[in-house]
Image: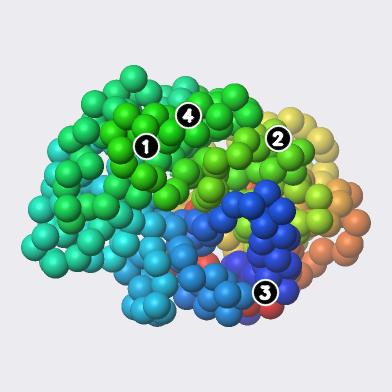
Amino acid sequence: MGDPRIIWNEQKLLENVQLLNQTCRQAGIDWIPVTKLVCAEEAIVASLYKAGIRSFADSRWQNLKKIKEQHSDVQTLMLRLPSLSNVAETVRWADMSLVSELATIRALHEEALRQQKRHRIILMVDLGDRREGVMPEDVLSLGKEIVGLSATEWYGIGVNLTCLGGVIPTPEVMAELVEWKIAVEEQLGHQLQLVSGGNSSSLPLLLDRTMPAGITNLRLGEALFMGRETAYGERIPGMHDDVFRLEAEVIECKEKPSMPRGLIGMDSFGQKPVIVDKGIRRRAILAIGQQDIPVSELVLTPEWAGIEIIGASSDHLLVDVTDSSHPVEVGSILSFTLSYRGLLAAMTSPYLDKEKE
Ligand SMILES: *Cc1c(COP(=O)(O)O)cnc(C)c1O
């Protein structure tokens, strides 16, 4: 050891899968795991596969490629709107993608013809969050253009909420999505198989049984890996919020004054440090820093009570361990839980080992 690492617990992950299976089954809908948060880490994908999962969603074609190469019998969904310059990769590695632009849909169609494949598309509708999606009043006119494209099968419609605008999924918003599905079927004579009602922020509607009929699918990342819904940021009852933890080793531990001594300039990131004088404190340095992940108290939470994050430079994280609930010395391994951003960065970082517990 010595290198910082991310440890994940397979048992807890599999129990989260079971709980999502149960919750969604009760509501009569499907869910698809979103693997971007864990960079489609091979061992994690293998674990989900073992649990019976055969569809995976990710926002990057590179991750979908990794999944397809690992398990050739799975279906893949591209979450981020495909770039025009990446339609070849999208068609090759994704069976289905979320779309909102006619030019992109046409390019996918042309590319699917070229690769002699069929590519399914889910038309995203902007129901208020103001990230991706066509405006509702444009669904039918755009729909008219895409029903005839033979190589791209218009498979469903979807919505994404609580990502940019912070809009909370309500039964009304979900019902609106279902209404657009019905409008497409009635006015364009085109059946849609899938109505994708959003991400982990839509889970509260399942939990309190207010999800309207007609929503057939959710795309779940944070709920699966972090045990949280994202509308109110609450832990989901019965789910594990500690599947992942970060460990780093103490490389120095000494009593030191909390105030610097000397002429004060800038810290290593060009900021003027703001320091509170707490007198002499027991301070530990951990072998992890900003180059590994953006370390701050917003991203990492020490598992032992009484430990406080002081700050970090490129390679060093300083914590105050004076009031730690457990003894800390050189060589101690400290453990942290991670925020969404922290886990995303940690899984992306080449400096962190990823280990199954
Ligand atoms: C990331 C993402 C999701 C999953 O979001 P979570 O909050 O992690 O469940 C679903 N859909 C789209 C389009 C996404 O980009």
On whether ligand 1 comes within 8 Å of the CB at mark 3, the answer is: no
- Of pointers 3 and 4, the one earlier in the residue sequence: 3
- Residue farthest top in this picture: 137
Taking 73 as reference, is 306 left or right? right
- Which class describes the residues within 10 Å of circle 4: few (<14), some (14-19), or many (20+)? few
Q: Nearer the viewer, residue 277 or 176?
A: 176
Tell whether label 4 touches label 1 (CB within 8 Å): no
Q: Give the label on residue 179, or none.
A: 4
- Of pointers 1 and 4, the one earlier in the residue sequence: 4
Compared to residue 331, the image places residue 102 above or below, namely above
On whether ligand 1 comes within 8 Å of the CB at mark 1, the answer is: no
- Which of discs 2 and 3 lies nearer the camera? The answer is 2
From this viewpoint, is residue 278 visible? yes
Disc 1 marks which residue? 185
- Which of discs 2 and 1 lies nearer the camera? The answer is 1
Q: Indicate the quadrant where residue 48 lies.
A: bottom right
- Which of discs 2 and 4 lies nearer the camera? The answer is 4
Quarter of the image for the C terminus: give it: bottom right
Residue 190: x %, y % from top left: 31, 42
Mark 2, secondary structure of its residue: loop
Disc 2 marks which residue? 210
Query: Could you tell me which residue is drawn at 47 percent across and 22 percent down?
Result: 128
Q: CA distance from mark 2 to mark 3?
A: 31 Å
Q: Give, as a three-letter code, the residue at label 2.
A: Thr
From this viewpoint, is residue 286 visible? no
